[in-house]
Amino acid sequence: MRKLISLLTLCLAIVSCTNEEFDIDNQPTEVKSRVITFTLGEFSQQAMTRASVSEINMTDLWVFDYIGDELKQTIHQTNEEVGFGSISATLDYGSHTLYFVTSRGVSPTVNTDAHKIVWEKPSDTFIATASMTVSATSGSSLPISLKRAATRLSISILDEVPANAASVEITPTERCYGMDYITGLGTDLVANQTRIVNIPTDYLGTSGKLTVSVFGFVPSEELQTNVSCTLKASDTSVLGSVNLENVSLKKNITSSYSGYIIGDNTKTFTLTVDDSWGTEDTHTW
C-alpha cells in the first residue's frame, strides 16, 4: 500500500512539474514591434535649404502615431531635452501613418480627439506626414523633412520712432490660433485679438528699422482679414495708427506691409523681403 501511494505521489509531482514548465500562458510572446529613430529637418520651400529643428529655434516637437484611424501613441519632445530633433519610437508591426509637428509657439494645448494643437501665441510651425509599414526587416532610422504650416504678417513702420514710443498693437479681425496636425489647416479662429509688441529701446530714434511680425494659420488656401496697427506711447496715448483692409494670409507666405504711421502717410516708402519664406505678398498703405 505504501509503495502504491509513493508511486502515485511521484506521478503527481511529475505532472505538476510538467504543467509548470510548459504552461503556454506563461511563455514569452514573440516581439511584434521595432524601434525607429526619426531625424527631423526643416525644408524651406523657396530657398531649398535644410536645417535641424534646433537651428531654427523650435521649442516643441510632437509625433502622432496612427494605425488606421486609431491613435496608438503621442510623443512630445522639448528643446530642453538632450538630442532634441531626433526622436525614437517603438512601433508595432503594421501600417502606420505618423504626423510630425515642430513649433516655437507659446503655451501649446494638444487635443488628440480633434487632432489639433492650439497655442496661446502662435509662432513659426512646420509639419510632415510619413506612411510606413513596420516589420522585422524595417530600417531603424528615417530622415523626415518638414514644411512650413504657418503664415506671417509683417508690418514695417518707416517713421522715426519717437523717444516716448513703447509698443505696437496689431489687431487682425480674424486669425487662427490652432492647427489641425493631420490636414495642416488652421483651427480656432479668433476675432479681434490684439497682439501687443513692446518696442526695444534700441529702436527709439531710428527710422525704417521697426518691423513687427505676427504668426498664425489659415483654415483654407487663403484667409482674408482686416488689420489695425497702432503705435502707442509709454502713457498708452496713440502716436499713430493705420487700418489695412483685405489682408491676404496664406500658408508659408509672409504678407509684408510697410509705410508711415505718424502724420502724413503719403511719404515715400521702402519694402523688405524675407527670402527664406515663399514668394512674399507685399503691400503699402
Image (cartoon, helix red, strand yellow):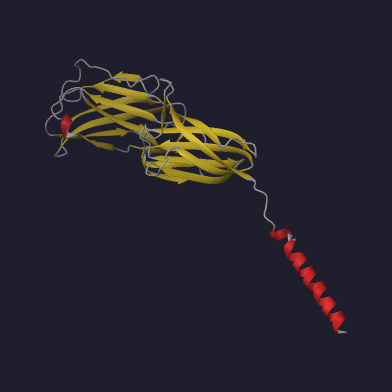
Q: Taking 125 as reference, is 246 above or below it?
A: above
Visible residue check, residue 181: no
- Expressed as whole percent of the image width and height from the top left, the position of residue 32 reads 65, 46
Q: Which image quadrant is residue 56 in? A: top left
In the displayed structure image, the side of residue 99 where residue 61 appears, left or right: left
Q: Residue at x 77, y 65 (%)?
A: 18
Residue at the image position 35 percent from the left and 35 percent from the top: 57
Q: Residue 243: give x, y in percent of width and height.
A: 27, 27
Which residue appears at 46% of the width and 33% of the height? Answer: 40
In the rendered image, which quarter is residue 132 located in?
A: top right
Quadrant of the rendering where the N terminus is positioned: bottom right
Task: List the single residue furthest toward the front.
Answer: 3
Q: Is residue 222 left or right of residue 229?
A: right
Q: How many marks?
A: 0
Q: Is residue 262 above or below residue 9?
A: above
Splitting the image into 4 quarters, where does residue 136 fall? Answer: top right
Residue 189 appears in the rendering: yes
Judge left or right: residue 25 versus residue 99: right
Q: Which sits in the foreground, 87 or 261?
A: 87
Compare residues 217 and 88 and report the one nearer the observer: 88
Q: Residue furthest bottom?
A: 1
Q: Quadrant of the C terminus?
A: top left
> Is the residue 199 above or below the residue 5 in the image?
above
- Where does residue 3 sit, x and y in percent of width and height? 86, 81
